[in-house]
Image (cartoon, helix red, strand yellow):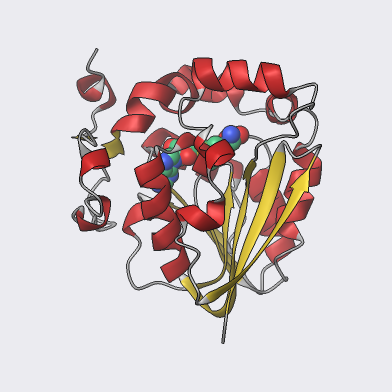
Amino acid sequence: MDYSETLGVKRESLKGLGTRPGALQLAPAETTSSAPVIPEYLHETYYWAYLNPRNVRRLDREWVVRTILWQQHNRLTRAAITEIKPGQHVLQTACVYGNFSLKLAEHVGPEGTLEIMDVAEVQVRNCRRKLNGCEHASVRHQNVMHLRDETFDVVCCYFLMHELPDDYKRGIASALLDAVRPGGKLVFVDYHKPHWAHPLKPITSFVFDTLEPYAKGLWREEIAEFAGSDQRFAWRKETYFGGLFQKVVATRKE
Ligand SMILES: C[S@@+](CC[C@H](N)C(=O)[O-])C[C@H]1O[C@@H](n2cnc3c(N)ncnc32)[C@H](O)[C@@H]1O
């Protein structure tokens, strides 16, 4: 079914990109003045979760995110936030359900800035509503793949990578690395391949096979590898909850 008219958005076809390495990097840049294209993976796989306005209202609750993340959401939020200092210029790469952005904005504080970017207009509007009154935080309608000539102290990519096709994982990792100023950090928090005996591995595997077709890319390949193990950065990784989750921090050398 073609939802593009219902949504009032243009669509971007990624078909065939797997056979054309580098094609994503050649995609035309989008300016903030024109609406970004909804990528096909988002439209086809996650319409119900992120684009359907009724479900956005239903799912945007802390308890929903905590349940999906096996009660690890607070811990993982802290793991991300601990990499950021108050007063820094921070990019959050997509909207997140619940209070994540508000916590990040509070932590950054009025001496800093939090810029959130999301490719879906319904998410942008919803996040602006949640941040209402927070003057140092703003939400931009943009595909983070098409960042241009902007740098941040910290770029925070919270549970976005597992939702991207592998080619897109590479393209976004590369775009985000370029957006980190010397001395700054790119922080990924996301799924990771759990220990083989992890009691939640079978159910996680089932959920991925059913609802999250790109997530197992993070079981097959390290995030640093998706980012080309870029030597301008020092890489470190920590895992959580029996290896089901990971934080990867790339610190840009001065
Ligand atoms: C951050 S991820 C999922 C986070 C987490 N599972 C949660 O609780 O929301 C979902 C968001 O990523 C956005 N998104 C997906 N691809 C994007 C892209 N290329 N650029 C910007 N935003 C993107 C979607 O529109 C959606 O709002």
Q: Position of residue 135 (x, y in %)?
A: 58, 61
Residue at screen point 50% across, 55% down: 225
- 14 or 123, which lies in front? 14
Q: Position of residue 133 (x, y in %)?
A: 61, 53
Going by the image, does 117 lie left or right of 146? right
Q: How many marks?
A: 0
The quadrant of the image that shows the N terminus is top left
- Residue 241 is left or right of residue 139, and the answer is right
At x 81% / y 44%, what residue is drawn?
A: 75
Quadrant in which the C terminus appears: bottom right
Residue 126 at least partly seen = no
- Does 204 appear above or below 230? above
Q: Quadrant of residue 98?
A: top right
Seen from the viewer's position, the closer of residues 200 and 47 is: 200
- Residue 198 against residue 229 in the figure, above or below: above
Place of residue 149 in the rendered image (x, y in percent of width and height, measured from the top left): 34, 73
- Residue farthest to the bottom? 254
Relative height, residue 88 to residue 199 (above, below): below
Left or right of 30 on screen, residue 95:
right
